[in-house]
Image (cartoon, rainbow, N blue to C red):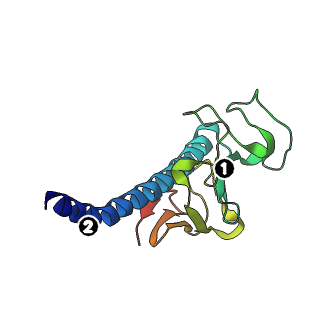
Amino acid sequence: MVICIVGILCMLGIPQFHSMLTQSKLNDAATELHSALQYAGDLAVRYQRPFGVEANASGEWFRVFDNRYKLDPSTHHDEDPPVDTNGIVLNPVDKKWYLVDFDTRASYEGVDIYAVPAGGEVCFHPDGHSSSSNSTFAMSLGRDKRAVVVNGATGAITVQAP
């Protein structure tokens, strides 16, 4: 009898546990994108030149770039901050180039970026603004969705759960 009761409780708890894991994975991915956008905005103000975040919906990745070197295939590791090919800047946390690929990171496996701003990027300017309109990066995992929104006038970044 005890085994049956434990079995029933497990059957009821597994879907809720799976839902919590899904939401956690999606929240972590949205937080990672939020951090990248915040970092690009901070770099633009600190170094007084444009920095941005580019996302690719078909490739499921995003990167932080120095706009000065975005189209340059050379590395500029002696710059401040260091810049790799095509302007990718160094992530100050893990000391790797700031390119996040959801397909290769197990912690974000299954997360999709299904809508990105026109052109796939947001560029922050030295005064803190990003553009004349809002930019939205939409993400999903299963039925759960998150939107990371950048206010163009102020550069403020929010994560929303529709």
Viewer-proximal residue, 110 or 144?
A: 110
Marker count (numbered): 2
Residue 162, horizontal then vertical, whole percent: 41, 73
Residue found at x 57% / y 33%: 94
Amino acid type shown at disc 2? Leu
Q: Position of residue 153 (x, y in %)?
A: 53, 62
- Please state which of the two labelled residues, at mark 1 or mark 2, is closer to the viewer: 2
Task: List x then y, in percent, for residue 114.
Answer: 60, 70
Q: Secondary structure at mark 1?
A: strand
The single residue placed furthest to the left in the displayed view is 1
Q: Can you give x and y, in whole percent of width and height, for residue 67 in the image?
A: 73, 48
Callout 2 crowding tier (Cα within 10 Å): few <14, some 14–19, many ≥20: few
Residue at 76% in and 38% down: 84
State the residue position of label 2. Answer: 12
Q: CA distance from mark 1 to mark 2?
A: 40 Å
Residue 23 is drawn in which quadrant? bottom left
Q: Residue at x 56, y 61 (%)?
A: 110
User: Mark 1 sits on what residue?
Assistant: 63
Q: Residues within 10 Å of mark 1 (few under 14, many from 20)?
A: many
- Where 50 sits versus 119, above or below? above
Residue lying furthest right: 73
Q: Are marks 1 and 2 in contact (CB under 8 Å)?
A: no
Judging depth in this view, the residue of 49 and 93 nearest the camera is 93
Amino acid at the residue labelled 1: Arg
Badge 1 or badge 2: first in the primary sequence: 2
